[in-house]
Amino acid sequence: MFYITREVSESLSPLFFLSAAAAGSLPLAKTNQLARSYNHIARFYDALARLVFGNRLRAPQLHLLAFIPAGARLLILGGGTGWILEAIAAVHATGLQITYVDASDKMVALARQRPAGGNTVTFVTADAATAPLLADYDIVLTPFLLDNLTTAQVAQLVAHIHPTLTRDALWLNCDFCNTRSPGGKLLLRTMYVFFRALCGISARSLPDMDACFANAGFTTAYRAGFSNGFIQAAVYKCADAV
Ligand SMILES: C[S@@+](CC[C@H](N)C(=O)[O-])C[C@H]1O[C@@H](n2cnc3c(N)ncnc32)[C@H](O)[C@@H]1O
């Protein structure tokens, strides 16, 4: 097994931390708060997600793994506890170069313990919108990350990631959708109250993800609905490839 890890941690790297904040994307206090936010619930996040949603958050993510080609350079943003690394290794036992970014150092610490097969994983603890990244990613995966952000923050994130992609890159996104069902609306509202209180996220409602991708010149190559349309998996194609 060939398994390399390298951690770039904002909390351990004051220089990067200051430069990212100085770059203008987030005020320092906000960056600091973001880095800590999911730490409070990292250890029980998976159990909580399973309790509320069963397998419904995992199914769309597993569905999207079919879009990852062998040997790809893969960028995962907001991966959480890292269960997805094991799932990816079950499909691609080796040959992927993965950069795994999460703002929570506790989430990253949990992810580092996951077996990733023979894939090479570089861990980065940082805000995805300012994270130091490599170049030439073939695939980006954002699993239930963008709902944490406002539309302006999603636009900023897409602008940061776009230049790091290859010409034919695909962006795989799964997240919640606005729904007409009263149950779905109540669940979404409850989630925002919960995550704003516990994790300090700034969003109050779902951002307009499609508009952010379209404005950045991405086209939608694939879309599938799950849980009666409450969750969707989408594949956006890099504009440069059109
Ligand atoms: C709702 S959890 C989803 C975790 C995982 N993708 C899953 O489905 O199990 C959101 C994750 O995104 C991370 N996160 C939130 N905002 C972030 C940001 N701006 N940059 C990087 N990671 C972020 C959180 O720390 C958390 O691990």
Image (cartoon, rainbow, N blue to C red):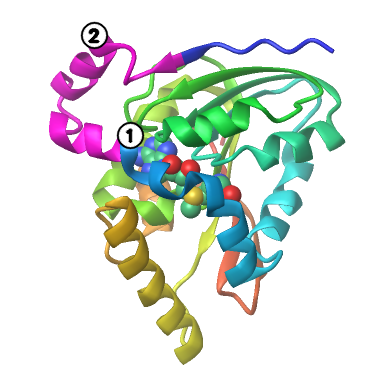
Percent from the top left, x then y, of residue 74? Answer: 63, 26
Location of mark 2 (residue)? 15
Cα separation, mark 2 vs mark 1, equals 15 Å
Residue in view at x 49 percent, y 87 percent: 183
Location of mark 1 (residue)? 35
Vertical position of residue 179 compared to residue 40: above or below: below
Bounds of the magenta segment? 8-34
Percent from the top left, x then y, of residue 150? Answer: 28, 54
Question: Within 8 Å: ligand 1 and the Cβ of disc 2?
Answer: no
* Quadrant holding the N terminus: top right
Residue 27 shows in the view: no
238 with respect to 132 (left or right): right
Label 1 environment density (alpha carbons within 10 Å; few <14, some 14–19, many ≥20): many
Percent from the top left, x then y, of residue 57? Answer: 63, 60
The quarter holding residue 2 reads: top right
Label 2 environment density (alpha carbons within 10 Å; few <14, some 14–19, many ≥20): few
99 with respect to 148 (left or right): right
